[in-house]
Image: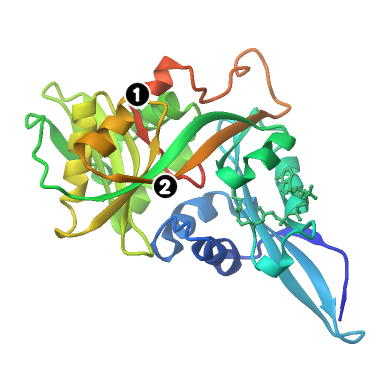
Amino acid sequence: MTRSSYQVRPCKNIKEVLETHYKWAIDQQWDSGKDGNDIKQVLYPIHPSSFLVGTIQEEEEKENKEEKILASICAIQYDDNNGFLAWYIVGEATERKKGYGLQIFNQGLENLSTSSWIGLNAVAEQVHNYKNSGFVVHGDITRYNGKNNNNHLLTPTTEAVNIAESPQLLDQLVDRDHHTIGMRRPTFIGHWVQYHSTYGWGLALKDKENKVVGFGCMRPLESGLYRIGPLFADSLDYAQDLVTRLMAKVPPGAEYTTDAWMTTPETKELFEDRLGWSPLVTFHRMWRKGTNINKNNEQVPCPYESPAIKNGYYSVVSVEVG
Ligand SMILES: CC(C)(COP(=O)(O)OP(=O)(O)OC[C@H]1O[C@@H](n2cnc3c(N)ncnc32)[C@H](O)[C@@H]1OP(=O)(O)O)[C@@H](O)C(=O)NCCC(=O)NCCS
């Protein structure tokens, strides 16, 4: 068997994405959304050319070439020109450490080179590699799992509205996502809200004055757990009530998970002390500059030290894409 040179190309269709990015992520136990619906309903429709695969041609005899897909990455550019890398995987363990990963990673970076900033969420083992590629850690994300411990509402005068049925709130949700995480991505948030109308639940919390004081979504996973993300709220009590209201959408006994933004001082208090959930694993948000830096975007989108970002940021929208 001979192998011809390695090539990186966009996926041909959603089927190919599900057979590579989605399947390999499940093998890694990443589990971003049941049936790959986060990819099918949100990410692929708005960013089809972002899903890349690394391939070689295998040849037993001349004229009998077969393409083998070895590696995946997703290199998304959001509306504001910030980029994000995800699903960086060499599918088969036996194909790792042969240079296939780094090549597709570099192609992903190249595709995003005209971004302002390029971000990713790193597993701990890969942080040193990403540092070698110019990335710097700017935040920590801890995955918490737990159950509903019969919480009562702390702010009973608030009202939760279904965001998919409240199109007039969309601009506010886009603004909140922007001011919380530092990237502006109306197309993504619009699709994320719609996705949760059929494949999950999305709530905006309003106070007595009808002001939106929080925003949260929850989706089922392949494992049977329910993942909460995002969780943005103006106070710890509002955040807790959003979690309580989301958990009430599914039968008692369910298990929940969330990817919590640990730079917010109250996050640990919410998930560990109040809800009694357990920390499982920590990821690291890393950023590097692209070429499109000017005086308006010279600060990293989501730095450790920004108070605007510390306040109200409890859980990330998706650990895959920020
Ligand atoms: C991470 C992964 C994709 C790397 O792929 P790989 O094919 O094994 O890596 P390569 O053989 O291309 O690595 C070649 C070299 O580049 C380094 N490298 C790999 N990715 C790199 C990156 N993004 N930036 C800089 N260096 C990198 C490697 O450490 C290696 O260095 P060495 O020769 O000094 O040992 C692969 O190990 C994998 O699929 N792991 C499981 C999924 C995972 O954890 N993905 C990352 C999530 S954040």
Drawn side of residue 36 relative to residue 286, left or right: left
Q: Which residue is mark 2?
A: 191
Relative height, residue 288 to residue 17 (above, below): above
N-terminal label among 2 and 1: 2
Q: Nearer the viewer, mark 2 or mark 1?
A: 1
Report the front residue among 253 and 202.
253
- Alpha carbon separation for disc pair 2 and 1: 30 Å
Please state the horizontal and vertical placement of residue 206, each as a whole percent of the image: 18, 29
In the rendered image, residue 248, in percent from the top left (x then y), is placed at 15, 50
Kindly give the residue lying farthest to the top in the view shown: 295
The residue labelled by disc 1 is 265
Residue 9 appears in the rendering? yes
How many circles with numbers are drawn on the protein?
2
* Residue type pointed to by label 1: Pro
Badge 2 marks a residue whose secondary structure is helix
Give the residue type that dot 2 points to: His
